[in-house]
Amino acid sequence: MLTYVIRRILATIPVMAIVALFVFSLLYIAPGDPAAVIAGDQATPDDVARIRASLGLDRPFLIRFGEWSWQILHGDLGTSIFTNLPVAAMIAQRIEPTLSLMAVTLAFAVVVAVPIGVVAAWQADTLVDRAIMAFAVLGFSVPVFVIGYVLAYVFALQLDWLPVQGYTPFADGVAPWIANLILPALALGSVYIALIARTTRAAMLEVLQQDYIRTARAKGIGPAGLLFVHALKNAAVPIVTVIGIGMALLIGGAVVTETVFAIPGIGRLTVDAILRRDYPVIQGVVLLFSFVYVIVNLAVDLTYTVLDPRIRY
Amino acid sequence: MNPPPVIAATTADAFITAKALDRVTAAPDLPDLLRPVAPRRGLIGFARRHPAIAVGGALVLAMLLIAVFAPFLGTVDPTALAPARRTREPSAAFWFGTDMLGRDIYSRVLYGARVSLTVGFSVAVLASVAGLTIGLVSGFMRWADGIVMRVMDGLMSIPPILLAVALMALTRGSVGNVITAITIAEIPRVSRLVRSVVLSLREQPFVDAAVAAGTRTPMIILRHILPNTLGPMTVQATYVCASAMIVEAILSFIGAGTPPTVPSWGNIMAEGRALWQVKPYIVFFPAAFLSVTVLAVNLLGDGLRDALDPRMAKRL
């Protein structure tokens, strides 16, 4: 068991190395001259040369990659071209709203999606099931920002129940903090809910066919106990897996949701960086989120043995 | 009940058939207890058997027609500026209103269908071809598999939207570059799927038979493996298409997609962003078109999955 955990943790190192190598080589494999693109159309040749030097494009690839990796290992994500501030500090400044948004969305999505999926499997092939699955297809199809605008229009502009845009730090009180996050979390969570609900339904359908479920039913256990205690426990592994994989949707969607709801987080930082062609910031954000994603999926892998003691390594 | 017509090939056959017919006609007609099975032929029959394919396909076709015939559907130049009539509400003259530069939103949305569908279909085709190649190679060349799949693991660890954003930040905004960026972000998922299908096909008896018959590996891949990957591949391609259209809209919406001069749905929404609280229709119309199109492609994918792979349909 312990050897498995250690092996699994060590196995993420090459993955992270490949991520780093790929993110770094984007500068080199991009067609055309990235320095000229970043400098913009009005740039003088001097500007382009300065940016090329600051990106290290004037030195050999391998040497530059070695230096860069060394910096990354020390928590240095480079320096912004536009503000000349360290990228790591810029991200740290803006991490709270993004973390809040993702945590609230994750909690909300799991709390909603898992019961929905369980009910859909229990009522398989009935009207209830069809309706839930139709909503899931809708959740996959309507983009995050469309849902965001519709929610903001109905619940903030028309009904005036919740704030339209903005963010209140957690330190200023829990009520205003959560009030500002409800609509963004609903919008961001829609795809995620659809994904988790579909997987939960599929996993539950498989489990519900098994003999022990019939035995439990024969013993007189009610539907709630049967579904949520006996069946869900054994359907947990694929559900937890998809929650981990779906984090990619959550991360990508956060960038857009923050734009719609004017939340000053990392997504907003990324969008500003795109407008200013501030590549080091974009690179830092991509790298950070990719590492977070790898670690989340490592954590998911490690929970398997807890969820299902039959899984041994 | 009339006996079915039989075409006799030889005289002996004709004799036997005639004898058989005698007997059939001699038996008394049974009362029709069961209603005769109406054969479901033609378009309507197909639509009843596969409602998702029919509805999704019809909507995708409608969108394709809109994209192709955009110039003939009462549109004007989607890039024509008219500062005199900015932000007009939807009316008889301007069905979807005008934006803050006075451009006709109806025309822009219809022309936007071209961008969205071009990106969706191109990415689906390119990612499928690349994914098929990589998946087949790593499914058959076992020494390459380890390396290729580690690289794919790494690529898959980068959230696709962020990967596309990073690529777009380094290139000039153009439809071609958007297609390339989204394709690169989609390839790992497709190649993983192809690889898993290839690995399970390799164990099939018909592949063993082909090997035993002395078929060379390239021929086995081409004749026995490739055709069997096309079913799951087609389903995956529709999902890739739907996801590519969403990613394109997101990229354009946050300013990392097609250049602002191109009327794409994401761009129209990006331009309406500042005004959406007072002029929500600028955002609403492209949003509706985008959602309906993606929904149609997803429905088509679900329908194809149910039709092509009934086992998988049960599981998801």
Image (tube, rainbow, N blue to C red):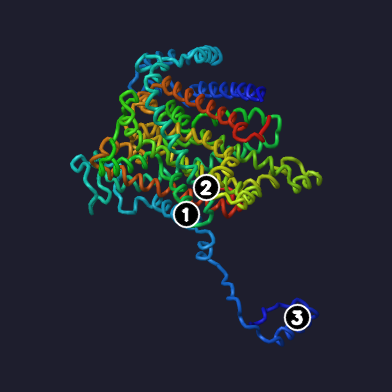
Q: Is residue B59 left or right of residue A169?
A: right
Q: Residues within 10 Å of mark 2 (few under 14, many from 20)?
A: few
Instruction: Say whether marks 3 and 1 touch (CB < 8 Å).
Output: no
The amino acid on which the numbered mark 1 sits, given as a three-letter code, is Val
Q: Is residue B117 visible?
A: no
Q: Is residue B221 left or right of residue B44?
A: right
* Residue at the spot 37% in from the left edge and 39% down from the top edge: A145
A18 and B78: which is toward the camera: A18
The amino acid on which the numbered mark 3 sits, given as a three-letter code, is Thr
Name the N-terminal-most of marks 2 and 1.
1
A211 and B174: which is toward the camera: A211
Q: Which residue is mark 1?
A: A128
The vertical placement of B230 against A45, above or below, is below
Q: Secondary structure under badge 1? A: helix
Q: Secondary structure under badge 2? A: helix
Instruction: Please provide percent x and percent y for residue B154.
Output: 57, 27
Q: Residues within 10 Å of mark 1 (few under 14, many from 20)?
A: some
* Residue at the spot 79% in from the left edge and 47% down from the top edge: B209
The quarter of the rendered structure image containing the N terminus of chain B is bottom right
Q: Secondary structure under badge 3? A: helix
- The Cα atoms of the two marked residues, 2 and 3, are separated by 64 Å
Q: Which residue is mark 2?
A: A224
Which callout, 3 or 1, points to the residue nearer the camera?
Answer: 1
Instruction: Please provide percent x and percent y for residue A20.
Output: 53, 21
Instruction: Please provide percent x and percent y for residue B304.
Output: 55, 52
Q: Is residue B207 left or right of residue A121?
A: right
Q: Residues within 10 Å of mark 3 (few under 14, many from 20)?
A: some
The amino acid on which the numbered mark 2 sits, given as a three-letter code, is Ala
Which callout, 2 or 3, points to the residue nearer the camera?
Answer: 2
- The Cα atoms of the two marked residues, 2 and 1, are separated by 17 Å
